[in-house]
Each structure stands twice: as C-alpha cells, then as structure tokens.
Image (cartoon, rainbow, N blue to C red):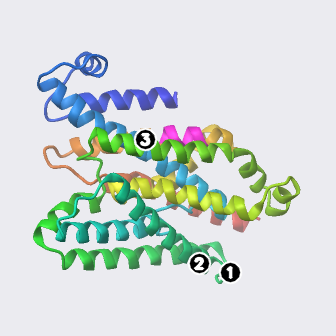
Amino acid sequence: MLTAAAVALFLLSLTVGSSSVTAGEALRQLFSPSSGLANTIVYQVRLPRAAAAMLLGGALSVSGFLLQSFFGNPIAGPFVLGVSSGAKLTVALTMIAALQNGFLLNSGMLVTAAFVGSLLSMGAVLLLSGRVKSMAQLIIAGVMIGYICSAVTELAVTFASDADIVNLHNWSQGSFSGTDMGDVKVMSAVVAFGTAAAFMLSKPMDAYRLGEGYAASLGVNIRLFRAALILLSSVLSACVTAFAGPVSFVGVAVPHLTKSIFGTAKPIIIIPAAFIGGGAFCLACDLIARSLFAPTELSVSTVTAVFGAPVVIFIMLRRERERRAG
C-alpha cells in the first residue's frame, strides 16, 4: 500500500501543474519519449523534480532513522540536531565563493561541501553529548547549533552580491525545483549507496537497540558501528541539502509514523519502509507547495513543517506521559 501510494503520487507529480498533461501522455513520454511540448514538460521539468522528491525524501527519512537509532531518541533527526543547517552553511559559503570568482560548481562539489558541514555539526553535537546529562538537553543543544549555522548563513548571504542572492534564495528555502537528469543521476548513486549500506547494518542496529552491552556480546564492534551510523546519516542528509536545501521535520516525522503503521522498530523492515514513506511524503508536500497557490510556489520546507511539526509535538507529549506513568 505504501509503494502504491508512492507510485500514484509520482505519476500525479508528472500530470499536475500549470500545463495539464494526462496520465496516458505522461506514461507515453516516460516509456517512449517524443519531441514536443509534452516531452519538455514531463521529461525535462517534472520527471527530474519528482525523482528528486522521491529520492531525497527517502534519504532524509533513512538519515533520521539512523540518528534516532544512534541516540536512542525518536526526536533526533538531521534538521532537529542542526546537521542540515551545518550542511546548508558550508554549501552556501561554497556557492557564494564560486559565484563571486566565476567558478562553476558541479554536483559532486556541492555534495562534498554539504558532507563536510554535516560532519562538523555532528561533531559538535557529539562533543556536547558527552557533557550534557539528558537527551532533552542534547536536542536543545542541536537546535541551538542549527540556529547558529543558519545565522552565519544569513550573514554570508547579506554580504553577497545581488546575483548571488538570487541564485541562493530558492535553494536556501528548500525546493526540489531546478533539478535536471544529471543531478538525478548523482543523487541516485549517493542515495543508493547510503541506503543499501544502512540496510546492511540492520542486524547490528537491531542488537544495538537492546543496549551496547548486548550488541557487544553478539560481536558488534560498537565504535566502528557508531562511526558507520554517523557517516551514513551525514552522507544522506548532505545529499539532500546539496540538491534541495534544508528540508525540515521529514527525518523525524516519517520514521515515527512508519514505526507506528508497521507496529515494529526492526530496521530490516523500517529502513525500506521509511525510504518509501519519506519519498511519498515529500512528493505529496511538493505537490502542495507548487499547486496550492499556483502560480506562486511555496518552499517545500514550509509544507513539511506544517505536517511534520505536529508529529514531533505528539512524540514529545507521549514520551512525557510515558515518563510520568513509569
């Protein structure tokens, strides 16, 4: 059912827009492309955008699940812990420097810059995790790191030239628009590697959920395993930020909803389910962002926050209720 919903939303993304295209015509352009307006609309504009929403939404959801497994907290996620903001900062600084010097950036450079920013932010969170006493304080620290990175990003944009600001505006708000098939190929390779590697860690992740001591007794190298979780989560969230900018709350809300729907937290089930669910969620949010007030387009983060933030609030309230009951 989740896969069917994702496929339906993907096809809907190819047909809905300022220029209407029938489902039959969209399918014909997918499997037998021909020249003309329909080919330009479907194959060059809407297909890359829908593919980016599916791939990056899935990557963000899996990244969130990895962080939740690492910290043992359902509120942990790339956006909440400031990882996305760190990636946003390094990508923005790289883009501004390149634009001012007339240097053309490729997709690999953007992903690398975002990965460096993700690791720096995650490193700061990990340093704080050894000093703060509760997970709630760690979440607050992550949010503050995110605000600091966002403030520095805004400062850099303020002093950038007008042309640079125009190029950065849509990206900094979070958007899947402007993606081409070349970008889709790069993000497909990165997301496929990150998701497959995360899935291969399903068994040690399942043991790790029961405690470090239990996992170690089963032969899991805890230090190597924790490093793998951090690196994979950073790669996936960096890919999202490099191509779509910061997208909020997907990494927290979708894994929680997926675990609730399937009634389990087993990684071998949740990782593929979260990927499909994250893709479907972002496809739906992107459809709303570009069609609700058409021709004006909202940022996708605005829509994901509207649907994702209530889920985070619900998680916090339920955890507090369980704490008091216990």
* Residue 72 seen in the figure: no
Circle 2: residue type: Gln
Q: Position of residue 75 (x, y in %)?
A: 56, 62
- Looking at the image, residue 3 sits to the left or right of residue 298; the answer is right
- Between 255 and 46, the one lying in front of the other is 46
- Between 176 and 232, the one lying in front of the other is 232
Mark pair 2, 1: CA separation: 7 Å
Q: Hey, which quadrant is residue 92 in on the image? A: bottom left
- Between 22 and 326, the one lying in front of the other is 22
Q: Position of residue 290 (x, y in %)?
A: 23, 44
Q: Which residues are magenta?
A: 271-277
Q: Position of residue 285 (x, y in %)?
A: 34, 45
Within 10 Å of disc 2 (Cα), the crowding (few <14, some 14-19, many 20+) is some
Q: Of callouts 3 and 2, which one flags the residue occurring earlier in the amino acid sequence?
A: 2
Q: Secondary structure at mark 2?
A: helix
Q: On the rendered image, what quadrant is the C terminus found in? A: bottom right
Which secondary structure dominates the residues rendered in magenta?
helix
Q: Of callouts 3 and 1, which one flags the residue occurring earlier in the amino acid sequence?
A: 1
Q: Hey, which quadrant is residue 169 in on the image? A: bottom left
* Residue 57 seen in the figure: yes
Q: Nearer the viewer, mark 3 or mark 2?
A: 3
Q: Is residue 291 above or below residue 242?
A: above
Q: Position of residue 65 (x, y in %)?
A: 58, 53
Q: Is residue 276 magenta?
A: yes
Location of mark 2 (residue): 137
Name of the residue lying farthest toward the bottom: 131
Location of mark 1 (residue): 133
The structure residue drawn at horizontal position 46% and vertical position 69%, both measured from the top left corner, is: 82
Check whether the beta carbons of the residues at disc 2 and disc 1 lie within 8 A of each other.
yes
Q: Is residue 168 magenta?
A: no
Q: Secondary structure at mark 1?
A: loop
